[in-house]
Amino acid sequence: MKNQVQLITYVDRLGGRRDGADLARLKRLLSEPGAPLAGVFGGVHLLPFFHAIDGADAGFDPIDHTQVDPRLGGWDDIKALTDELDVMADVIVNHMSAESPQFLDYSEKGDASPYAGLFLTLDGVFPNGATERELLTVYRPRPGLPVTYATLKNGERRILWTTFTPAQIDIAVHHPQGRAYLSGILKTFADNGIRMVRLDAVGYAIKKAGDSCFMMPETFDFIGEFAGEAKALGIEVLVEIHSYYRRQIEIAAKVDWVYDFALPPLVLHAFSFRTATGLKRWIAVRPTNALTVLDTHDGIGIIDIGADASDRTAHPGLVPPDELDQLVERIHAASQGQSRKATGAAASNLDLYQVNCTFFDAMGRDETNYLLARAVQFFLPGVPQVYYVGLLAGHNDMELLTRSQVGRDINRHYYDAAEIASDCQRPVVRRLIDLIRLRNEHAAFQGQFEAPPSDDAVLHLRWTHGDAWAELRIDFAAGTHSLTHSTEAGGSAAFAFS
């Protein structure tokens, strides 16, 4: 994976038209000379582009994980994009659509279906039946039980394992059918030039009676096996886990790459409470094999900096619980109450541990502070990713939220070509692109990182590589800041945030 900033985007929401040419259009936007984003990014994470992109969970419930949705283009278009940029794609490890050919065949034929072993049922985990206590032990970030009572088309009644929604049927990943299904996805990706994959929902993939069914030792074993298979095909693996921060550290020691999901709320906390204490606590212990983010297609994680729910006293969070509660309220206030309409039980949102809001609106549309937040992201060790809405300093899409009643859609705007061209002329976007280019091109970021000691209110970050250096200093209490760096001529220069 290149040590350069990557873009995260849906293919059809960044200048797309769903006319069969969206992938080709995205390639031109990111690489054609003269295009607004030409040469800005070293890689791109394409959010689900599989058939179909508009299911129950915006593509995270694929009907056919090995087919590009024809409204976007085809595998030739993916391969053409990989010739220009590093491309990451999702492997939805835990489940597939209830509309998939495999599940439809199983529903019609039951145990006579060749796919009968592909789908996980309650008795596949609890062959002797499950007690109330055992079911309540299963960790789930959404309300309700992780199973769905279903009557198949052939009249048989089954209790299916459905970690997320009844439309997303969990896969029996250790069954030969499950292994073959996932291996087929990896092989298709490798054949088309994809060299990075994100394991979506992998923390839930292994189920075990009497346990939490989340990030167990057996889960790590599965991740290791899958990553080994991917590595043999030349593919790196990113694990996506929202959890208590110390668990993230443990996970990072066992995988190729993890997300730094603690960073977004900690940055917001630093600006909101005018202190760097939480950030500096995290910087001292955080894993460096991380993809740094401030925003993604999901919400802003709260669980990632809070106390461990299993023992809040023995395992406190990175910020005090009262400040965490206040932070959520301050995000709602900064967004003029818009995020409240998309968070918690609002708008059919089930991810109760996340606040749904664009990052720019979560910061009250303060352009200077927003750019400073990006500078913090880019200065931390790891590979930065910028979400397409965040790239364009996007606002909450209340019209889309009202229309879909899906909380996360507040931060999943559909941009047409005219909006992209216009937004790329906004000063905050132009400065962000300049900052991305500085992070990609300056030699210091290929060297050594340090966070020199400083006062509680001050964050001081520095990179050096030979004679090259870059330094960021933010005093959250005083509201002062500076980003300076060496020049090729041997002098120094300052980055202008406004």
Image (tube, grey):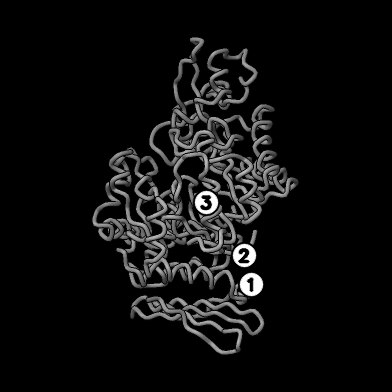
Tell me where residue 395 appears, x and y as whole percent.
33, 56
Query: Which mark is nearer the camera, 3 or 1?
Result: 3
Badge 3: residue crowd in 10 Å (few <14, some 14–19, many ≥20): many
Q: For mark 2, what is the residue?
A: 3
Looking at the rendered image, the quarter that the N terminus falls into is bottom right
Please name the residue that numbered disc 3 is placed on.
Answer: 26
Mark 1 or mark 2, which is nearer the start of the sequence? 2
Q: Is residue 214 left or right of residue 318?
A: right
Q: Residues within 10 Å of mark 1 (few under 14, many from 20)?
A: some
Mark 2 residue element: loop
Q: Earlier in the sequence, mark 3 or mark 1?
A: 3
Which residue does the image show at 46% across and 27% down from the upper left? 147
| SS type, badge 3 | helix
Relative to 489, 369 lies left or right: left
Mark 2 in CB contact with mark 1 (< 8 angstroms): yes
Three-letter amino acid code of the residue under disc 2 = Asn
Q: CA distance from mark 3 to mark 1?
A: 28 Å
On screen, residue 376 above or below 494: above
Compare marks 2 and 3 and give the one earlier in the sequence. 2
| Residue that carries the numbered disc 1 in the rendered image | 446
Q: Label 3 sits on what residue type?
A: Leu
